[in-house]
Amino acid sequence: SAVISQKPSRDICQRGTSLTIQCQVDSQVTMMFWYRQQPGQSLTLIATANQGSEATYESGFVIDKFPISRPNLTFSTLTVSNMSPEDSSIYLCSVERLGLGRNEQFFGPGTRLTVL
Amino acid sequence: SQQGEEDPQALSIQEGENATMNCSYKTSINNLQWYRQNSGRGLVHLILIRSNEREKHSGRLRVTLDTSKKSSSLLITASRAADTASYFCATAVPNFGNEKLTFGTGTRLTIIP
């Protein structure tokens, strides 16, 4: 398994500001993913972050709103820009661990964001 | 639209009973995975079943997959209070040489001591 940490674990932010969430993995991984989980909802993939290339965004998500960095194989950041109350969610990063013909994803503990 | 729809949305059972959750999906998949989430925290991977498998066991967990009906079920036997959590199915589909996970709507399971 992979050990994943996220910072901050939670934050309360004002409308119009930006927050950068960090995701650190204890081993090198190729694929890192960022998800959003709105209150009481399931997870929605925001983007896939590959080291050395631009992130690939899912439909409905754009780089200007959710810029992502992936400077190396163990670290990534997601910024939630110009926040509004609709951005209040749990944001989770995950990594894909390949092996034995199985593709599992391991998730970080999440960042609970509240926008006032 | 959601790839995975789960039912029931919520389930409450007595400790010791078995809990069954169902997941339906719409497209062909590489595999289907089940995850558990405790109180809005990170997800924990429970079990993966490949598209050519029909049943898989892991401890008190039993997963079935019916690709003809595009459905899966998760059975937790002899439930415990610690099993109280939300359970999500996730379907893995090919995505530019990798796989993309799409999560279902989730089932909120409550085990009553």
Image: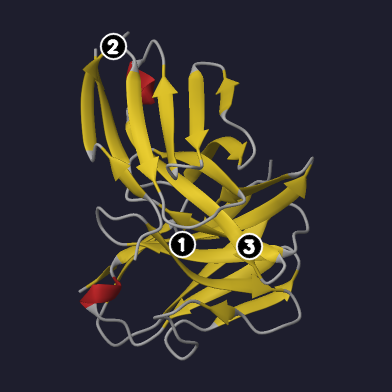
- Asked whether disc 3 touches disc 1, contact meaning CB atoms under 8 Å apart, the reply is no
| Residue A18 visible in this rendered orientation of the protein | yes
Of residue B87 and residue A6, the one placed in the foreground of this image is B87
Of residue A28 and residue B77, the one placed in the foreground of this image is B77
Residue B100 locus on image (x, y percent): 57, 62
Q: Residue type at mark 3?
A: Pro
Nearest to N terminus: mark 2 or mark 3: 2
- Pointer 3 chain: B
Colour basis: secondary structure
Q: Are marks 2 and 3 on the same chain?
A: yes
- Pointer 1 chain: A
Tag 1 residue: A8
Quarter of the image holding residue A42?
bottom left
- Under tag 1, what secondary structure? loop
The residue positioned farthest toward the front in the image shown: B68
Distance between mark 2 and mark 3 Cα atoms? 39 Å
For residue B15, which numbered disc appears in the image? 2
Q: Crowding near pointer 1: few (<14 within 10 Å), some, many (20+)?
A: some
Residue A112 locus on image (x, y percent): 36, 59
Q: Crowding near pointer 3: few (<14 within 10 Å), some, many (20+)?
A: few
- Pointer 2 chain: B
Tag 3 residue: B94
Select label 3 or label 1 by which is in front. 3
Which residue is at a point 42% across and 32% down the rendered structure image? Answer: B73
Q: Residue type at mark 1?
A: Pro
| Quadrant of the snapshot with the N terminus of chain B | bottom left
Q: Are marks 3 and 1 on the same chain?
A: no
Q: Residue type at mark 2?
A: Glu
Distance between mark 3 and mark 1 Cα atoms? 32 Å
Which residue is at a point 27% across and 39% down the rendered structure image? Answer: B7
